[in-house]
């Protein structure tokens, strides 16, 4: 708990919609308290702007505890801000000091059209999930939960991949705007578990096909996605996806039911297992 | 308003089977002819969309978020209860039924609670089959842990992110139905009104949060799964957009609102740090498996907690409740913390906190084991407070977290408006006056995956539907009303922002209707809230237009909270007893425990809307206890 108050300058990206031209607007924020979260600092500024009948800064957030994936923008060039493996709602003002100039920009990617200021449209990620990010089991048909034992280490690994919050930071951090960490995490989660095996071939083929169609780029081994992922998902997810993809292509050649999809390139990312 | 709970006949163990046998079915070929609207995509809404989509109904889903995966179920941490008895520690469906009914202080319906316990085991089976990565033991089978109000280990979990994993599971199943063409998702839409035609719920009006357009949708049935109303207290563990508006609109269209005063204050949240605070963060109840709650024995002790020797610490929960110790239910733990703080034993800079200490657990099990179990929670605590809970005890304090009250539903989860079903936290059904930890996830998924898919067909097959068109007067009238209201709110040229009104409301509610309530305070609040409402319509400060406008969204939600708060206060005033989360200071035992009055208050209080400036009418659904006789709830 610190009581010192300080002043900062914000440079915030303002843009009316995806087709308008954007620009940086400068705001002075006085009396910042170190225990404030970054978003609470913006709340305080917005309250002041509304009082002055000025337009507030539009941004999204909901749970404010780093799990819903709603928030996200770029702070001084860092996706989700300077804290490692964190969402921007978990960033606190104690990270900054008096006189700092802080620049805030939206996540930028072709597949994430801008809606307003820092608010973007990430619905492309839902489309990738709808293409196969599930196990097809109807309600009522499951066997007793303990009939499917899963090795503890494998269950933990699956959980590591399953913790993705769908915030889109991996896409925003990637110089190619690739969604391969996002897609790979879901594929790796489901392919690790025995329950996910029956659909692993068709899943990877369909999810990659849809991912490619949405305007996301390709992986060139920059590892930026791993560096910013709030849930510390590793690029081994991409390696796992590529192996699943390669395997699926061999199999699908012999199975006329499956779509023959060939990926742009097969990326060599070492797996950490 | 007639309250018919429609509890099926037969022994409690057979009721759900009897119901399903007697229910009418819809032929698979006919299902796609029925349109079903679902509002909300949390556990209850998403699982309902999945199960009804699988069955073949034509499902249309609405969420105010950019994607259905953001719903606040995602933030549930600790776990989900199920009577699997995998630990062979004495669990059974009957025991889960008993614990849940007792935990709710005998203010829930026996038949509903029993069904919930019955279904609990199927939920785990289904979630494992769809790939939810629950924690496992070395043998590869599922692990469980303890939660409050139970003396056994029946809580399944996925680290401290169980809600996230269950929600993403339900979301993935819903997206599978999107791919199958049975479910259509409309994101960034907020419900503005319910359409009732010929006495039946037949559609909704929504606001497109991007374009500001007011849109109408019709259907054969409407399912509301819009969560709880803890944000009426302004600061709560709920997400920023959680609101009461959809439920409130349904209440105004004739749906009874049940037990609004049953609100849950969670004992273990990170204490507030200042006026700028926008929300409170929960530290999962599971932490009480290993953490010990204490305060210094000396009032106003300013020493560093690690410098306070063992004999000068008061582990008050262990002292007062030796059988359950740190794992007493939430209402009990919250009140005990409040008593300690009120008596001057509070800790930290604000003195509004108690310690939750892991020193002994780390000594016994090692830091790594504690990290494996609660790592993400310790990280979250560190980010917010800048303190390392591995070496310093956490500071915690109670905060509004969950609301047991909600729209009244019968055994089929249908409200008093035919065709309007209410699932999950939005209904009042299963938790009585206090919910046990790890039971919200259980209820949301029971309602969505297993109950609605059995009860909705019975309604559809038994009902004669008139034709409906979006040009009908009911839609036109409602659209016009919504537009007028928005216009009116945008035209107020006052000085107070929506957030300022919200803060003010929260202050009133927390002060007079929070952890402890009394007649004088409630009456005072009942004078303050209506004048706040009046002030809102004259003194609101708002910017922007009727298109994309987050300030307007907030203003509309806050206004509904203010209206709703009055009903909550009325309910709290009328219930002259203490039970569960509803603690009336006038009704307590000599040692400060809740004193229930079964003779006069063993009923569900259901409020009927009678008009904007008229008193709501109280209806009572008497609670019959055939299998479990209400006893004084003791955890000592």
Image: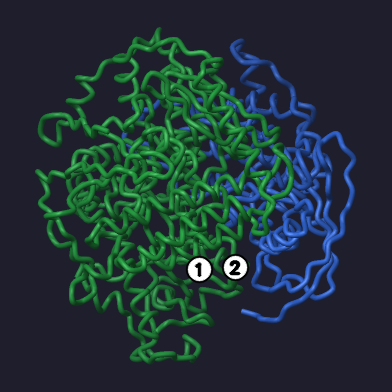
Chain colours: A blue, B green
Question: Can residue B435 be spotted in the picture?
Answer: no
> Is B260 or B495 nearer to us in this picture?
B495
Question: Can residue B390 be spotted in the picture?
Answer: yes
- Per the image, the residue denoted by label 1 is B270
Q: Residue at x 19, y 46 (%)?
A: B92
Residue B592 image-quadrant placement: bottom left
Q: Residue at x 48, y 40 (%)?
A: B42
B449 is higher (above) or lower (below) than B437 = above
**Picture quarter with the N terminus of chain A:** bottom right
> Is A225 or B468 nearer to us in this picture?
B468
Asked which secondary structure carries label 1, the reply is loop
B4 is higher (above) or lower (below) than B383 = above
B432 is higher (above) or lower (below) than B375 = above
The x and y percentages for residue A104 are 81, 55
Specify the subunit that label 2 lies on. B
Q: Residue at x 49, y 41 (%)?
A: B167
| Number of other residues with Cα within 10 Å of mark 2, as a class: few under 14, some 14 to 19, many 20 or more | some
- Per the image, the residue denoted by label 2 is B384
The x and y percentages for residue A159 are 52, 47
């Amino acid at each position: 708990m610190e009581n010192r108050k300080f002043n900062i300058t914000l440079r915030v990206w303002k843009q009316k919609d995806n087709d308008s031209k954007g620009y940086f607007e400068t705001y002075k924020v006085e009396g910042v308290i170190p225990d404030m979260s970054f978003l609470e600092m913006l709340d305080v500024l917005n309250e002041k702007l509304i009082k002055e009948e000025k337009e507030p800064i539009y941004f999204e957030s909901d749970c404010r505890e780093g799990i819903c994936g709603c928030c996200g923008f770029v702070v001084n060039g860092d996706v989700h801000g300077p804290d490692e493996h964190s969402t921007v709602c978990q960033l606190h003002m104690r990270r900054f000091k008096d006189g700092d100039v802080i620049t805030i920009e939206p996540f930028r990617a072709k597949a994430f059209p801008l809606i307003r200021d820092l608010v973007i449209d990430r619905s492309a990620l839902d489309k990738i999930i709808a293409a196969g990010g599930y196990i097809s089991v109807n309600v009522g048909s499951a066997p007793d939960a303990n009939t499917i034992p899963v090795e503890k280490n494998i269950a933990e690994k699956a959980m590591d991949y399953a913790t993705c919050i769908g915030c889109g930071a991996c896409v925003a951090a990637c110089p190619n705007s690739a969604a391969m960490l996002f897609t790979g995490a879901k594929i790796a989660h489901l392919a690790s578990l025995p329950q996910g095996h029956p659909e692993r071939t068709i899943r990877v083929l369909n999810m990659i096909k849809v991912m490619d169609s949405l305007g996301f780029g390709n992986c060139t081994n920059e590892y930026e996605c791993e560096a910013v992922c709030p849930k510390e998902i590793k690029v081994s997810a991409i390696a796992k996806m590529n192996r699943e993809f390669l395997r699926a292509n061999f199999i699908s050649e012999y199975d006329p039911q499956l779509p023959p999809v060939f990926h742009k390139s097969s990326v060599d990312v070492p797996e950490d297992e | 308003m007639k309250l018919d709970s429609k509890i099926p006949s037969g022994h409690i163990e057979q009721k759900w089977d009897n119901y399903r046998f007697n229910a009418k079915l819809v032929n698979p070929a006919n299902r796609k002819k029925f349109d079903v609207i679902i509002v909300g995509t949390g556990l209850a809404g998403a699982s309902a969309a999945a199960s009804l989509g699988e069955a073949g109904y034509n499902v249309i889903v609405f969420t105010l978020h950019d994607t259905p995966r953001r719903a606040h179920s995602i933030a549930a941490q600790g776990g989900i209860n199920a009577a699997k008895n995998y630990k062979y520690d004495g669990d059974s469906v009957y025991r889960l039924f008993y614990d849940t009914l007792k935990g709710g202080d005998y203010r829930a319906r026996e038949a509903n609670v029993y069904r919930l316990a019955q279904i609990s085991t199927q939920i785990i089976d289904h979630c494992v089959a769809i790939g939810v990565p629950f924690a496992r033991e070395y043998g590869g089978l599922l692990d469980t842990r303890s939660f409050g109000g139970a003396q056994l280990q029946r809580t399944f979990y996925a680290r401290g992110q169980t809600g996230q994993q269950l929600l993403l599971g339900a979301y993935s199943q819903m997206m599978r139905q999107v791919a199958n063409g049975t479910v259509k998702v409309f994101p960034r839409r907020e419900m503005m009104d319910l359409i009732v035609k010929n006495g039946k719920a037949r559609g909704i009006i929504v606001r497109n949060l991007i374009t500001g357009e007011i849109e109408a949708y019709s259907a054969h049935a409407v399912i509301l799964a819009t969560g709880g109303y803890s944000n009426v207290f302004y600061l709560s563990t709920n997400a920023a957009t959680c609101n009461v508006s959809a439920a409130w609109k349904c209440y105004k269209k004739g749906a009874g609102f049940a037990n609004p005063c049953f609100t849950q204050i969670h004992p273990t949240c990170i204490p507030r740090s200042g006026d700028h605070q926008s929300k409170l963060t929960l530290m999962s109840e599971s932490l009480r498996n290993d953490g010990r709650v204490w305060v210094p024995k000396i009032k106003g002790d300013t020493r560093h907690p690690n410098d306070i020797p063992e004999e000068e610490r008061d582990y008050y929960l262990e002292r007062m409740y030796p059988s359950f110790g740190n794992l007493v239910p939430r209402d009990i733990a919250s009140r005990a913390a409040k008593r300690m703080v009120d008596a001057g034993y509070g800790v930290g800079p604000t003195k509004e906190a108690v310690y939750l200490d892991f020193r002994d657990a780390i000594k016994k099990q090692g830091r790594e084991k504690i990290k494996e179990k609660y790592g993400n929670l310790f990280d979250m605590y560190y980010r917010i407070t800048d303190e390392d809970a591995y070496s310093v005890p956490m500071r915690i304090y109670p905060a509004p977290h969950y609301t047991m009250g909600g729209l009244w539903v019968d055994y089929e989860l249908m409200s008093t408006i035919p065709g309007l079903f209410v699932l999950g936290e939005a209904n009042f059904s299963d938790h009585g006056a206090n919910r046990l930890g790890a039971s919200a996830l259980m209820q949301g998924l029971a309602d969505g995956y297993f109950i609605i898919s059995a009860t909705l067909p019975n309604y559809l097959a038994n009902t004669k539907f008139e034709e409906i068109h979006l040009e009908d007067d009911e839609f036109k009238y409602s659209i016009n009303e919504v537009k007028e209201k928005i216009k009116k709110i945008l035209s107020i040229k006052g000085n107070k922002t929506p957030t300022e009104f919200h803060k003010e409301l929260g202050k009133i509610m927390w002060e007079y209707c929070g952890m402890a309530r009394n007649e004088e305070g409630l009456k005072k609040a009942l004078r303050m809230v209506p004048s706040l409402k009046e002030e809102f319509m004259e003194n609101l400060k708002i910017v922007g237009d009727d298109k994309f406008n987050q300030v307007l969204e907030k203003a509309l939600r806050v206004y509904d909270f203010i209206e709703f708060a009055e009903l909550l206060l009325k309910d709290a005033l009328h219930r002259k007893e203490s039970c569960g989360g509803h603690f009336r200071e006038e009704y307590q035992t000599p040692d400060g425990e809740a004193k229930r009055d079964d003779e006069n208050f063993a009923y569900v209080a259901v409020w009927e809307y009678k008009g904007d400036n008229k008193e709501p009418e109280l209806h009572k659904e008497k609670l019959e206890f055939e299998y479990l006789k209400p006893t004084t709830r003791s955890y000592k």
